[in-house]
Image (tube, helix red, strand yellow):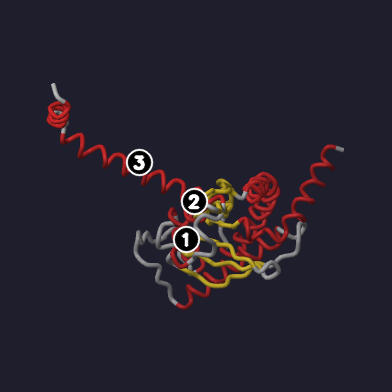
Amino acid sequence: MSQLESAHQAKDNTNPLTDLIQPTIETNLSINQIFSQHKMDNSLDTRVTNGVSNVDVKSLISYSQMALQRLPLLEVIFERLMKSLTTSLRIFTSSNVEVNIVNMVSMQFGDYIEQVEAPALISVVRSRQWQTLSLLSLSPQLIYTIMDRLLGGRNQTKDRGSKPLDFTPIERHLIKGLVKLILDDFSKSFTSVTPVTFVDERLEINPRFALIVRPADAVILTRLNIMLDGQAGEIEFCIPYASIEPVHEHVLQIFRDQKSSQII
């Protein structure tokens, strides 16, 4: 058989369906690889020089150390907040209040924004001394419950589902008072660590309008459950690691001193 006949026979035996599918599989694979590498590059601050990708190892190690070093002391701070907020909300609402920490996790800011259900009441929080931003989110159920208590209702919380959060001027004033109460207690929880004052810069209902850092930036998310006379609600603190960078060394030194005193 001649070489020309062999080539024609090989072409005839080719499955056209396989030829159609194979490039698609290879294309999808390459796209997934590119996407994964792009996401990794954003997360690790990757730089490309002369076609070679170099990961900023120093930044990666720094963020890993922050996650291990800061969380223990932040847990202590939020435990203080939990206790003080229980007392403050009891006085504020004249109700039986129980506050508990649900969890504290590290994640990317973009992942947090994606999981926030709209509508939600989000306070963009500024720390005066550090000049950095964080987020405080209050669930609609908590807001409606507290509004009922403050305006004379009892166990008549409205379930508005996904409807917009529309409030009267009086309700807005009360909500701002509630946010200020939470942030004042949060500021006091830092007293033994470093003086700082957290203030409400603005309120947002749409999470897309509360973008304070890049989606790939690391944040600490702390969720607290609040029970008022059997009605449950939640608040969430979203704190970028960069927002507590100004007190990194100070916070770390205090945590080391506490560990040393425990050992002694």
Is label 2 in a helix, a strand or a loop? loop
Tag 3 or tag 1, which sits nearer the N-term?
Answer: 3
Tag 1 or tag 2, which sits nearer the N-term?
Answer: 1
Tag 3 or tag 2, which sits nearer the N-term?
Answer: 3
Q: How many numbered discs sit on the rendered protein?
A: 3
Label 2 Cα crowd, 10 Å radius (few <14 / some 14-19 / many 20+): few
Label 3 Cα crowd, 10 Å radius (few <14 / some 14-19 / many 20+): few
Query: Which residue was labeled with disc 1?
Result: 145
- Relative to the observer, which residue lies in front, 51 or 188? 51
- Relative to the observer, which residue lies in front, 123 or 20? 20
Residue 230 is labelled as 2
- Relative to the observer, which residue lies in front, 1 or 31? 1
Label 1 Cα crowd, 10 Å radius (few <14 / some 14-19 / many 20+): many
Query: Which residue was labeled with disc 3?
Result: 29
Q: Residue at x 75, y 54 (%)?
A: 251
Q: Residue at x 67, y 44 (%)?
A: 68
Is 138 rendered above or below residue 12?
Answer: below
Mark 2–mark 3 contact, CB under 8 Å?
no
Where residue 30 sits in the image (x, y, percent)? 37, 44
Is label 3 in a helix, a strand or a loop? helix
Where residue 100 sits in the image (x, y, percent)? 58, 48
